[in-house]
Amino acid sequence: MTVQDEAPSATAGDALEVWIDQDLCTGDGICAQYAPEVFELDIDGLAYVKSAEDELLQDQGATTPVPLPLLQDVIDSAKECPGDCIHVRRVSDRVEVYGPDAE
């Protein structure tokens, strides 16, 4: 048996979205450092995703599309997050491809 270190990668045609579980967020801000266009820390010290219009999305489970040019930065954010709270999934079937629940 082998252990898989990498989550299954998305193909170029797969639209992806990202969301943050604020219950697990540690507020380290690593995500905002990697991808400030996608993530932002709010005054409560927790990270949230932002809309394409740069609006902070504070509803529980709010998602935002992952822009293709920022895909690697968003993936790195999910991998480096100390709270394991960043989830990246395919829009088509809602399968998590990066993050704590990726298969």
Image (cartoon, grey):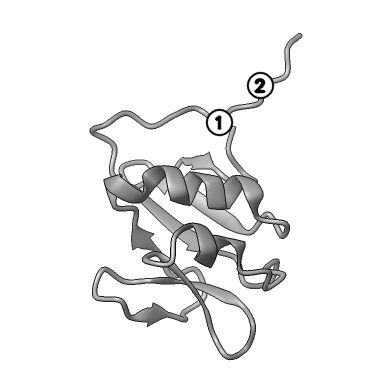
Kindly give the residue lying farthest to the bottom in the view shown: 43
- Image coordinates for residue 65, horizontal then vertical, percent: 32, 57
Label drawn at residue 7: 1
Say which element carries label 2.
loop
Mark 2, other Cα within 10 Å: few <14 / some 14–19 / many ≥20: few
Left or right of 58? Residue 2 is: right
Label drawn at residue 29: none
- Image coordinates for residue 78, horizontal then vertical, percent: 57, 50
- Check whether the beta carbons of the residues at disc 1 and disc 2 lie within 8 A of each other: yes
Image quarter in which the C terminus is found: top right
Residue 79 placement: quadrant = top right
Residue holding disc 2: 4
CA gap between label 1 and label 2 equals 7 Å
Amino acid type shown at disc 2: Gln
Q: In this view, does 89 lie above or below 85?
A: above
Q: Residue at x 37, y 41 (%)?
A: 93
Q: Is residue 2 above or below residue 53?
A: above
Kindly give the residue lying farthest to the top in the view shown: 1
- Image coordinates for residue 42, horizontal then vertical, percent: 54, 84
